[in-house]
Amino acid sequence: MAYLVLSNGAIFEGLRIGAPVERIGELVFTTGMVGYLETLTDPSFYGQIVTHSFPLIGNYGVIPEDFEGSSALFGYIVRELCGAPSNFRSQGALDGYLKAQGIPGLCGVDTREIVRITREEGVMNAMICDKVPADLSALKTYQVRDAVASVTCKEKQSYSANGTEKYRVALLDYGAKRNIIRSLQNRGCSVTVWSADTKAEAILDTDPDGIMLSNGPGDPKENTGCIGEIKRLLGKKPLFGICLGHQLTALALGGDTVKLKYGHRGGNQPVKDLKTGRTWITSQNHGYAVVSETLKGVGTETFVNANDGSCEGMAYPDLNCFTVQFHPEACPGPQDTGFLFDRFTAMMGGARHA
């Protein structure tokens, strides 16, 4: 037996899964019914203990071809863990993967109650441990630090276009998901992935046709160096930002971001297109949001979350730039907004979009 201890004093007893280590992290939940492998390998979960609201996890095993990156989360909480996966692509059970990656977890706990507490009280710290400590000060003072620096690539990487090369894209890696690269490759783009601390001049010296800013973990305001380099990139080339890239662009242009009560994580987030009135179902994973009001006169809000009205997209036509909070490359999950990659390639071809 082991315990999940919340910083509000709540204690949940469950069965150990994964690595036999103790860990403190920021407790969040995701509502996706599928995609646990993509969740486990999304670098945006760095520093967090992830709770699945869907009760059965692990039923199709571990499939490395579906990974989005390297596992960066700090803990894993599920109601029921499948020990006998059934899928012709499976290369093992999930518990073995967690152990190999050094990720501790619990199963057999009331995940419904954990999600309810998080929704009502907001994101809080939590600890996976074998014995409940008498002193919770370390738990209460924990903060996710140096998140982007911990997940960005260590050296430049290059990927060829699928088929004829039409465009060359520079992708700044703040914790990029692999399907961003695949989505660009499928549209005739060769992709060069740069580490988060790369100077703007180094990227511009290669004369790419467009620049992408990726998703990533942590508080966007912590990344002052990245924000400064984005300032130097804006207006120089067509630019498309996703998730953290959306937030960093807003900060680079003088806007503000705020931490949401419990964030948006899962494959069922409704987003309203303010230009057409259409609502799209999107995949999301973030705990912070851009305050669109702080960008009046600088950019135009393009999408809002249909549940809470928070900003989900901005356009900066004068800078040939647009950004979104959600994941148009989501895999698995709805890919209905994949047209945004087509919009980006059109910009590289000379078209401008409001």
Image: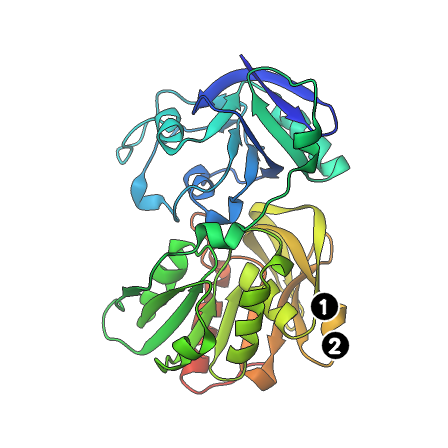
Distance from the alpha carbon under mark 2 to that under mark 1: 7 Å
67 relative position to 333: left or right: left
Picture layout, residue 249 above or below residue 107 = below
Picture layout, residue 14 above or below residue 324 = above
Residue 324 on image: x %, y %: 57, 64
Residue 279: image quadrant is bottom right
Q: Dot 1: within a 10 Å radius of its alpha carbon, few (fewer than 14), some, or many (20 or more) residues?
A: many
Q: Amino acid at mark 2?
A: Lys
Q: Which residue is mark 2?
A: 296
96 relative position to 27: left or right: left
Q: Nearer the viewer, residue 73 or 303?
A: 73
Residue 97 on image: x %, y %: 36, 30
The tally of labels here is 2
Q: Dot 2: within a 10 Å radius of its alpha carbon, few (fewer than 14), some, or many (20 or more) residues?
A: few
Q: Nearer the viewer, residue 282 or 14?
A: 14
Q: Which residue is depicted at the point 65% across and 75% down? A: 253
Q: Amino acid at mark 1?
A: Ser
Residue 45 on image: x %, y %: 52, 44
Q: Residue furthest left?
A: 163
| Screen quadrant of the C terminus | bottom right
Q: Residue furthest top?
A: 1
Q: Secondary structure at mark 2?
A: loop
Q: Which residue is depicted at the point 51% across and 78% down? A: 233
Q: Which residue is mark 1?
A: 292
Q: Which residue is depicted at the point 33% across and 76% down? A: 168
Cβ–Cβ below 8 Å for labels 2 and 1? yes
Q: Nearer the viewer, residue 70 or 81?
A: 70
Residue 134's label in the rendered image is none
Q: Which residue is depicted at the point 68% across and 27% down? A: 6
